[in-house]
Image (cartoon, helix red, strand yellow):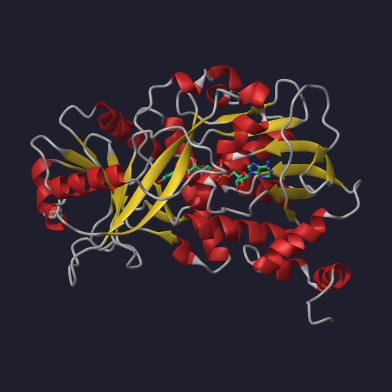
Amino acid sequence: MSKAGPGRNDRRRFLAGLGASAVSALAGNRLARAAARENAMEPAGKSFDVAVIGAGVFGAWIAWHLQRAGQRVVLVDKYGPANARASSGGDTRVIRMAYGPSGIYTRMSQRSLAMWKQFFARIERPELFRPTGVLWMAGADGAAARQSVVELEAAGVRHEVLATEALARRYPQIAVPPGGWAIYEPDSGGLMARRAVQAVVDDAVRAGVRFQVDAVEPLRGEGRLGAIRTASGASISARSYVYACGPWLGSMLPEVLGGRIFPTRQEIYYFGVPAGERRFDAATMPIWMDFDGSYYGFGDLDARGFKLANDAHGPAIDPDSADRAPTRAGIEHAAQFLAKRFPALAGAPMVAAEVCQYENTSNGDFVIDRHPGYDNVWIVGGGSGHGFKHGPAVGEHVAARMLDGAAVEPRFALAAKRDAQQREVH
Ligand SMILES: Cc1cc2nc3c(=O)[nH]c(=O)nc-3n(C[C@H](O)[C@H](O)[C@H](O)COP(=O)(O)OP(=O)(O)OC[C@H]3O[C@@H](n4cnc5c(N)ncnc54)[C@H](O)[C@@H]3O)c2cc1C
């Protein structure tokens, strides 16, 4: 080996000598990326049953389920699993069951929570789910919250309804407005998002899924897709393809989804709690959603700070090139909200931030459907700011459609989506 480090052939031999599990255990670090790049340079012509493009939460779980069902799967991502630009790349995501009148999501979330927990138990990483409980706070006229109660009861989800006084008594750190009430889900909580997706990919690779870092070229036209080409010049052929590219779906499938997936810039802030203060700790303060739905957040988890996210859609964003520094206006707006709702945190400093993007459809429903021009291509995405929790159930749902011919859910059909850019954003 020269002082300059291993040559390409040495490196290829070294990487080939690593078992799949050794390579997967390294996923996310430099060596795993190198391994993935070397894999991408394998001679064209190696064929798979399914090629999944995008290793966010949806692509990761789709690959996982397809492999479990006996498929030979290749999973390709241009930056790596749950990377910092991906919608799944954040620290934490909420998993809750209350979904207003949309019982379909309540049931998917219920199924997903069971699968997440089972998965984390099997890989001996239970810390990737934090059962903090979730508190959906509603105003006096909270119609969606009332409908949630009906759906939670129908689905048998454990929950408690807290009237104004009970809410204020149990959580004195919250300034409860007149008529405010809440639904408390004791079994729901937070998923350690980025690490959870990376664990799913690692597990899939250990079981035989091939993972590659490479950028797949956009798809146009129609017919039967024989192979996809990548930026490195590789060609990957499979019987079927799944495009699970999150906010990139519009640019990857411009003729089909150009206007129907609209990525918006979203900021998340972590505020430092006063020294010695325990009332805002995640063990005391559940994940919460505010009375008018504008903000939601987490108690201080792993000493990262009190998390606050503005759920209102931000401006359009390019997920490849966006500047990910938070805006002064956003921080000030969040700080004002914090002082109003959690008065003991007035003046708390912002100690960390994340900038991510929602990949919105016109009605917030997912897209899980066949490509209208290619009968061996599936499109999966449109998480619209609430998709993460559903990863395991979405993977299972997609595998059932691809392998067993289960019918497309009308609510997830492409035909049910309009041009998402016409949606009002601010
Ligand atoms: C700030 C914020 C807060 C959120 N909070 C919650 C929450 O609390 N609970 C919840 O359930 N959901 C939440 N969501 C939504 C959730 O995170 C997303 O819906 C979900 O992560 C989308 O996953 P995905 O796999 O579709 O997309 P992504 O995670 O974006 O993955 C897509 C992948 O495709 C890859 N890719 C793109 N183009 C190519 C190409 N040409 N070739 C190869 N690979 C490519 C990308 O690199 C990326 O890794 C939140 C989202 C944001 C932004």
Q: Is residue 334 left or right of residue 375?
A: left
Q: Is residue 95 visible?
A: yes
Q: Is residue 120 above or below residue 242?
A: below
Depth order, front residue of 107/230? 230
For image coordinates 59% across by 17% down, the residue present is 415
Total tally of numbered discs in the picture: 0
Q: Is residue 96 visible?
A: no
For image coordinates 76% across by 48% down, the residue present is 73
Question: Split into 4 quadrants, where in the image is the N terminus?
Answer: bottom right
Q: Is residue 109 left or right of residue 23?
A: left
For image coordinates 19% across by 59% down, the residue present is 348
Q: Measured from the top left, where is residue 70 in percent x and y?
A: 77, 49
Depth order, front residue of 79/173? 79
Q: Measured from the top left, where is residue 90 in percent x and y?
A: 46, 53
Depth order, front residue of 58/161? 58
Quadrant in the picture for residue 30: bottom right
Q: Measured from the top left, where is residue 370 in percent x and y?
A: 69, 26
Q: Measured from the top left, where is residue 151 in percent x and y?
A: 36, 33
For image coordinates 18% across by 72% down, the residue present is 276
Q: Is residue 111 left or right of residue 376?
A: left
Q: Is residue 319 above or below residue 256?
A: below
Question: Split into 4 quadrants, where in the image is the C terminus?
Answer: top left
Q: Is residue 205 above or below residue 106?
A: below
